[in-house]
Image: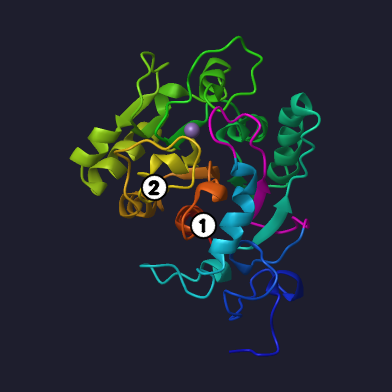
Amino acid sequence: MDTKGGDNAFTAKSVHQNTSEPMYSGALSFMRRKYTRDLTGIDVAVTGIPFDLATSSRPGTRLGPQGVRRASVNLAWAPHFPSGRDIFGELAVIDYGDMVIDPGYPHKIPEMIEDHARDIVSSGAKMLTIGGDHFISYPILKAHAEKYGKGISLIQFDAHSDTWEDDGDRIDHGTMFWHAAKNGIVDAAKSIQVGIRTHNESTHGYNILYGPDVQAMSIDQIVAKIKDVVGDNHAYITFDIDGLDPCYAPGTGTPVLGGLTSHQAVSILRGLAGGINLIGSDVVEVSPPYDVSDITSLAGATIAWEMLNIHAVNRKP
Ligand SMILES: [Mn+2]
């Protein structure tokens, strides 16, 4: 162990530098990555959006980025499992820090999130966002559509469809994928929702693997289905942590029984590595105040790590 090192988030000389500092000490950053807003040559920028004003039930996801960062340092010492891949040797990944949210001006926040996303996405770096409630995915998707074009394939892990219809002006974490499909930002026919287990009569054209479907299928079948729907289209993964069963993710606002196991989640994401054209991703709805032993924060951190693995596999040397 390098006992002279420490606080890699601020002392790292290179974005590829790893650290052996213990998980219980040092300045926190996502996976001990260098904390910087310099996007030059960066493959993936991890950023937090501590926003939970669109939450319909229990709040607390404004603390999600902090929780996921804290849990992530427990993963920072080892190569990727089971590939053994040195992800941070291959990929230039930074912690871009959190977006500053002023809760006093709620109606300005969606546009500010879009601006924040545009700053990252326009640089060419891939954006990996830690939420925040699920509403944040909508302005982030808008910024991605500006860069990559409309008709993005959404791969959504979730207990809820988030496609409820509203009057068009709500800041709501249950309606944004209806907006995204209606506006053409997302191509619902080339998108898939995985793990849905709440009733919504209208699918709005999204392909859906309901919770019971997931349990009846093998990992390979699920991965094949997702790849079949998405093809080589630009793909964006949004992982609502309530896609996991509450026993794997108790720390969230609207838990629903009968969800994915953490094994299913990481296995599906590993199966997608090398098989989809991933342009961005997020992990949302982690609510540390409702968490137990950081289970949910650790799930969020590990899922984000698997998203980085997909980027690493996709990156052509
Ligand atoms: Mn959701």
Quadrant of the rendered image containing residue 184? top right
Judged left or right of residue 59, residue 307 is left
Q: Is residue 191 above or below residue 236?
A: above
Query: Mark number for residue 275?
Result: 2
Three-letter code for the amino acid on which mark 1 is drawn: Ala
State the image coordinates of residue 60 (x, y, percent, origin top left).
Answer: 60, 42
Is residue 56 highlighted in magenta?
A: yes
Q: How many marks?
A: 2
Q: Is residue 159 above or below residue 220?
A: above
State the image coordinates of residue 96 (x, y, percent, origin top left).
Answer: 71, 55
Q: Residue at x 74, y 45 (%)?
A: 99
Is residue 117 highlighted in magenta?
A: no
Residue 233 visible? The answer is: no
Secondary structure of the residue carrying tag 1 is helix
Q: Is residue 184 above or below residue 14?
A: above
Judged left or right of residue 127, residue 255 is left
State the image coordinates of residue 191 (x, y, percent, origin top left).
Answer: 42, 29
Q: Residue at x 24, y 34 (%)?
A: 212
Q: Nearer the viewer, residue 294 or 152?
A: 294
Three-letter code for the amino acid on which mark 2 is drawn: Gly
Report the magenta residues as a range: 37-59
Please tell me whether mark 1 or mark 2 is closer to you in this view: 1
* Alpha-carbon span between mark 1 and mark 2: 22 Å
Question: From the image, which quarter does the C terminus lie in?
Answer: bottom right
Secondary structure of the residue carrying tag 2 is loop
Kindly identify which residue carries mark 1.
301
- Determine whether the beta carbon of the residue marked 2 sits less than 8 angstroms from the nearest atom of ligand 1: no
| Mark 2 burial class by Cα count in 10 Å: few <14, some 14-19, many 20+ | some
